[in-house]
Image (cartoon, rainbow, N blue to C red):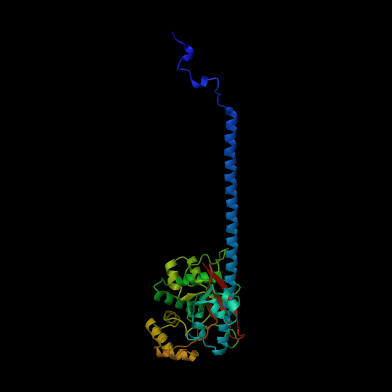
Amino acid sequence: MKFSWLSPRRSASSSPLSLPAPRLPAPRAKQQGAAIISALLVVALSAILVSGMLWRQQVQIRRIENQRLLSQAQWVARGALDWTRLILRSEGDTSAGITYLGGLWGVPIAKTRLSDFLGQIGEGRAERGAATYLSGSIEDAQAKFNLRNLVASPAPGVLQLNLDQVAAYQRLLVSLGVNSQLAKNTAVQMRASLAHSATRFQTVTSLTGTPATPSIQGGATGGSNYTDNPGIEDSNENAAVAPLQMTSVDSLLDIPGYTQEMVARLRPFVTVLPTPSAVNMNTASAEVIAAVVPGLNLSSAQALVARRQTVFFRNAADVQLALRGAGLQSVSTDTSELDVNTNYFLIHGRVQHERAHVDRTTLVYRDALTHTTRIVRVQDEL
């Protein structure tokens, strides 16, 4: 006899004392999950936006700090330039019109703290300059061959090529291993670039206060050393668009035939000044002296430079005597081409102010008549 109510297969869930587990409706659970995900996305997006704003604010603050440091470094560089101009002006007043390598201007300044200069002024100012360093040097710009000399103005309103200077530049190119035919191309380019220049008719002023006019000696077409036809075709000379004015040695790259290697080789011996200038025989290199003095070879020029280290030239008569001692008996010195004084100087300065750096090269003109100096151009090096 079987009793179904005693069957062991009866589950505990069928007990009248047990209650079923409560369950949430499926749509409500999905809504709660979507709300949590949305909240997480909002928090993440807010964090991204806040971090982006903080980053942009930090970059802006850093940029303002860099601008402040750079501005301070530029003001320090300006002060150093004024101090250098004072040195040039004071030495010009005491050197009797002679510029030589043994002068005070020729001593470079090694990397020095600004506080070393300001220490005598006050302890507070010295502490401000503890993180600022100065260094620099002065270079005689007239110790190099001036490409502006390739073009002369024998008459008001006239620009013509100076064949003597073109020949001198050819000799310089030959001594440096550069194609000498580039001298004529350079002269034509210089004349074309000066067509609209404000200084195209300016000449160098001598110590006597009168403009130094170039000597005309014959030997070229028309009985002078100036010509409009240098022997090459110049189809672009009368072009509607004039070439850019040559202001530095890097301008040679605009002339077909020059390369970066050639310009780097010419840089220590060539410059571009606003007006024609004489070569300073007290500071010029042997290559430049051999180029500007016809008939003087490089070995004789090197011997002249070696003797110059003992006794510098005081006037044009000393230069002429030294050239005769080098083997040139019939030589005449013209102060418009060979001189012992300098008007143009290149001032190389470097200022390091914390993380700001300023590398600047300034061309300065020293006027021997007015005993003043003025800035011609400023170039910041990157």
Number of marks present in the image shown: 0
Tell me residue 161's x, y (percent). Answer: 51, 75
Which of these two is toward me, 214 or 91? 91
Q: Quick check: 355 above or below 117?
A: above
Tell me residue 279's x, y (percent). Answer: 49, 82
**Residue under the point 47% across and 89% down:** 313
In this view, the residue farthest toward the top is 1
Image quarter for residue 55? Answer: bottom right
The quadrant the N terminus occupies is top left
In this view, the residue farthest toward the right is 370
Tell me residue 229's x, y (percent). Answer: 50, 72
Q: Is residue 259 visible?
A: no
Which of these two is toward me, 240 or 104? 104
- Residue 143 left/right relative to 64: left
**Residue under the point 45% across and 70% down:** 263
Image quarter for residue 94? Answer: bottom right
Tell me residue 342's x, y (percent). Answer: 53, 83
**Residue under the point 43% across and 87% down:** 309
Which of these two is toward me, 158 or 331? 331
Q: Is residue 13 visible?
A: yes
